[in-house]
Image (spheres, rainbow, N blue to C red):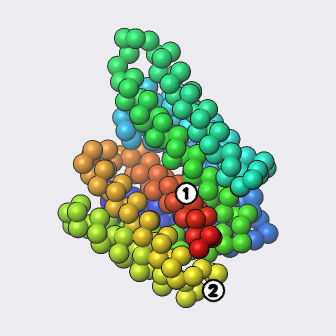
Amino acid sequence: MRIKVLFSGLVAAALLVVVASLDSMSWLMGVLTAVLQLIFAYTWPRMVRSDAPWPITIILALCSLAATASTMFMPGGSVMSHSVEAIAVGVLLVFISQVLRGAEAEGRLAGVVSGVTGIVLGVLGSAWAASAYVPYGFGLAVTTVVALLGAGAVAVTRLPNRMTMILAPVVAAALGAASSALPIDMLWYQGATLGLLTGLLVGSLRALALVSRSVRNMSGILGLACAILLMSGAVSWYAMEVLAFI
């Protein structure tokens, strides 16, 4: 299963890098981001075994697509400024959807937790679309994908979770720093920071997936791969926003 998750994620990540290199077609990154968000919206509730997956799927899809659309067509003070609004609306809709299931319905609290978590992951994944509208977008994509490759290579091993949580960030940070040697307008410490955060993300989600045994079928494979991709884009985006002040 771990190899299938890695393969699925790397195929999508390679597409992100290819699309990021097309400066004249920034809209294509938004389309690819939307596709990843739709796959995530369908697979996430099923991966966490939600008792009522369809309401959560619909809410995830609507809020994630709205965030990506606002990123592309309604830029505010920041390209990602409307993400907070999409998350707020999504959280409210998740609570309403679980209340409407009735007092006797099972798994309502679990539905709220999985729904809110999915909203945050899906909406913040619009950072990939936002990366097409900043000068360092291609460098962000390349560095993040290189770090994902390194962290993923560690994650597919049978090493204990604690060892993986150490090795994945170290390997990803080293590869992220090394990727700054490429002509991608990325400084070494920026690449190392993006790699470190990406490695921590991969190690954490790998540990959670193994403990919860949630990756059992194709929905689990695609759900975890999309979750890692969307969240890594968000982490890299906000890290670069902070590093811009250094």
Residue furthest front in the image? 246
User: Label for residue 183?
Assistant: 2
Give the percent coordinates (x, y) of residue 135.
71, 72
Looking at the image, which is closer to me, 189 or 53? 189
| N-terminal label among 1 and 2 | 2
Question: Are there few (<14), some (14-19), or many (20+) residues within 10 Å of tag 1?
Answer: many
**Residue 12 visible, this angle:** no
**Residue at the spot x=68%, y=45% of the render?**
82
Residue 204 showing in the rendered view: yes
Q: CA distance from mark 1 to mark 2?
A: 23 Å
Q: Is residue 124 left or right of residue 206?
A: right
Kind of residue at badge 2: Pro
Q: Please state the horizontal and vertical placement of residue 5, each as a whole percent of the image.
A: 39, 58
Say which residue appears at 75% left-offset and 53% top-offset: 77
- Where in the figure is residue 133, as x and y percent of width and height? 73, 63
229 relative to 146, above or below: above
Q: Amino acid at mark 1?
A: Ala
In the image shown, does 107 or 213 lie closer to the viewer?
107
Hey, which quadrant is residue 162 in on the image? bottom left
In the displayed structure, 27 sits above or below 171; it is above
